Amino acid sequence: MALIRPLTFLTAFRENYTMCRVTQMLLTIDIGNTAVTLGVFRDGPTAGNGIKPEERLVTTLRFATDSRRLADEYGIMLKNLLEFRGIASSDITAACICSVVPPLTGMFEDVCQRFFGVDPLQVSSQIDLGMPIKYDTPRDVGADRIVDAVAAVQLYGTPVIVVDLGTATVLDAVSRDGEYLGGAITPGINVSVDALYLNTSLLRRVELVAPQAAVGRNTTAALQSGIVLGYAGLITSMVERFKNEIGHDAKVVGTGGLVTVIADHAPVFDDVNQELTLVGLDLIYRMNAGKTTLANASQSGDTSD
């Protein structure tokens, strides 16, 4: 059974946050096709003393991706959501973005500049990632895939396989030598389900839970078997193929909004980590900007609003 991490460290930090204000903070933004996920990481004297990245994660936020929104709308929404969590815009001293939605990439850069007073680092194959990209055309790799791979190597070592179940279901492989090799992409669970419902007359939507048996005795159970157990079988089979190529000792980490749907039915996961992308953004920012950027901003009194 996969280990799904409880977020007790987030709860503990929020309870003590108002009593011990931290002003050096990194805003991480993961812009996906379905949702935008934010994470705020604290920095300070203890950040380099063996504290894990996920332990510096103050809070996370998610909202629906909507290309029709304007920069001002996103900016006001971000400020209000962060203030609701006790984080002022002046606390944000740096930002890092990964995006697979080009129309929103520049918009969120503008939001960071105008609402938080910071120039965000945008993840691409052109910056220091700490690992060689062995894809045939490195610039074609989705930024989120790179970020997940960086975090997985840092947290779990090599070789490692990342299974990201979101709008698309994506598997990525990192070699024993720490090289990003590539992976596999298939339509995500919801994309496949939507296509099924839109192209059939009698099939209806069902809850995404596993049925009691693989052989469904009614239409609802048959759909749940095909969707949940079918995707679990897909993941199990593909992970085995990946391990045949990169090593049977490879760790397997699951992430993405839909990973919990199949995690208990695909006996391949060593861990399930919903904060993997945010942790990767934090690590990549530090590779490129270093802790001195956050520290210098605090020492110079630069807390732009």
Image (spheres, rainbow, N blue to C red):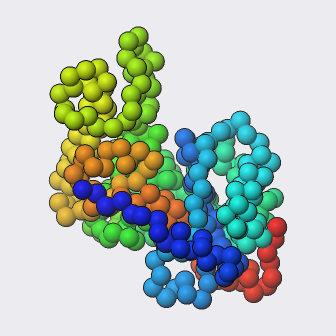
Residue 102 vertical position relative to residue 29 in the rendered view, above or below = above
Q: Quadrant of the N terminus?
A: bottom left
Up-down relation of residue 231 to residue 8 (above or below): above
Q: Residue at x 47, y 69 (%)?
A: 8
User: Which residue sits at x=22%, y=35%?
Assistant: 212
Q: Quadrant of residue 255?
A: bottom left
Quadrant (top left, top right, bottom left, bottom right) of the C terminus: bottom right
Q: In front here: 25 or 201? A: 201
Give the x, y percent position of residue 32. Answer: 55, 46
Residue at (46%, 18%) from the top-left corner?
A: 198
User: Residue 75: x and y, percent?
Assistant: 76, 53
Q: Is residue 206 above or below residue 62?
A: above
Question: Can the viewer see residue 65 in this picture?
Answer: yes
**Is residue 135 visible to the viewer in this orientation of the structure?**
no
| The one of 76 and 289 positioned closer to us in this rendering | 76
Instruction: Give the percent coordinates (x, y) of residue 244.
Output: 17, 53
Q: Is residue 70 above or below residue 42?
A: above
Is residue 214 left or right of 148 when viewed as pictured? left
Q: So how many labels did they put on this image?
A: 0
Pick the front one: 19 or 122: 19
